[in-house]
Amino acid sequence: MKISALLAVFRIALSKAGEYRTVILLTSLVAPSLNALIQVFLWKAVYDSSGKTELGSLTEFSMIAYCICAALCYSFTGASGNVREASDDVRSGGLNKYLLRPVAHDLYTLAAAFAEKVPIAFVLCLLFTGLVFLLPEGSIQGDVGTSSITALCMVYGFLIRFFIGLTISYLSFWLEEVWTFHVIVDISLWFLSGMLVPLSIIPKEVYSVVSLLPFQFMSYVPANILIGKLPPSEFLNYALLGLCWVLVLWGVCRLTWWRGIVRFGAYGG
């Protein structure tokens, strides 16, 4: 599939995304704000009732900053709507339009999904910039290097969530309904990504496993970078780990497509 075709898909999807400004506002501002507010009240109650000044190496104020950053990061890396629509294309025969043209379905869907995230990313940049100035100095790391590695990890998180979701949708080649799997993954990722609970406070035995999984890039890793809890010496390791997981999950997604497409059949007009 040519780059020019992907760029055309991206531009069309970006124009389409711009038509739904209310949805963008809800996705990038209202929803993460509510998530962060609930988390702040919850953890404030936890700190007050426990009498501890730190939990998982996070002070109460650091926990508040983490909750805000984690919720904002998750709003960007969360699932895209067109990923789940792929399963409908398989069942309804809408996949024909991709098979009859020189269009790679996964790359087409990726270009459209990334276009959906561009307006959200713009809003998040404004919010993160505001947090740098509104919160006490040093609460949010706003230098160029930190911002760049945070953006890279968020892109990793988006790609990881995208390929997981698309792989589940491709299971429609074998299963009549895959919606339940999407719901199970969504619920699981609230915890595994670190959006609901910082991974640093879970038992060490569990964290030693979770820290090797890709889900942390959706919220925990970029949020920790922003609040300065991830040392710069670890940036390269996480960058390589995220890249490896993206390539592995892309390969799994492609393999699922190749094995499933041989079973596909659609007839009529």
Image (cartoon, helix red, strand yellow):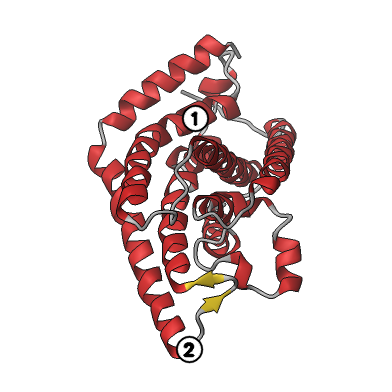
Corner quadrant of residue 207: bottom right
- Where is residue 39, by image quadrant? bottom left
Badge 1: how crowded within 10 Å, few (<14), some, or many (20+)?
A: some
Whether residue 27 is visible, yes or no, is no
Residue 216, given in percent of the width and then of the height, sits at 61, 54
Residue type at mark 1: give it: Gly
Q: Is residue 86 left or right of residue 140?
A: right
Q: Which residue corresponds to the image point at 74% horizontal and 55% vertical from the top-left? A: 212
Q: Residue 201: which numbered mark, if any?
A: none
Q: Position of residue 221 (x, y in %)?
A: 59, 52
The amino acid pointed to by label 2 is Gly
Give the label, 2 or 1, closer to the camera.
Answer: 2
Counting residues from the start of the chain, the first of labels 2 and 1 encountered is 2
Residue carrying label 1: 94
- Number of residues whose C-alpha sits closer than 10 Å to that of mark 2, classed few (under 14), some (14–19) or many (20 or more): few
Q: How many marks?
A: 2
Q: Which residue is mark 2?
A: 51
Percent coordinates x, y for residue 59 in the rendering: 49, 72
Residue at 55%, 37% (x, y): give it. 145
Q: Is residue 210 above or below residue 251?
A: below
Residue 22 visible in image: yes
Q: Which image quadrant is residue 2 in?
A: top right
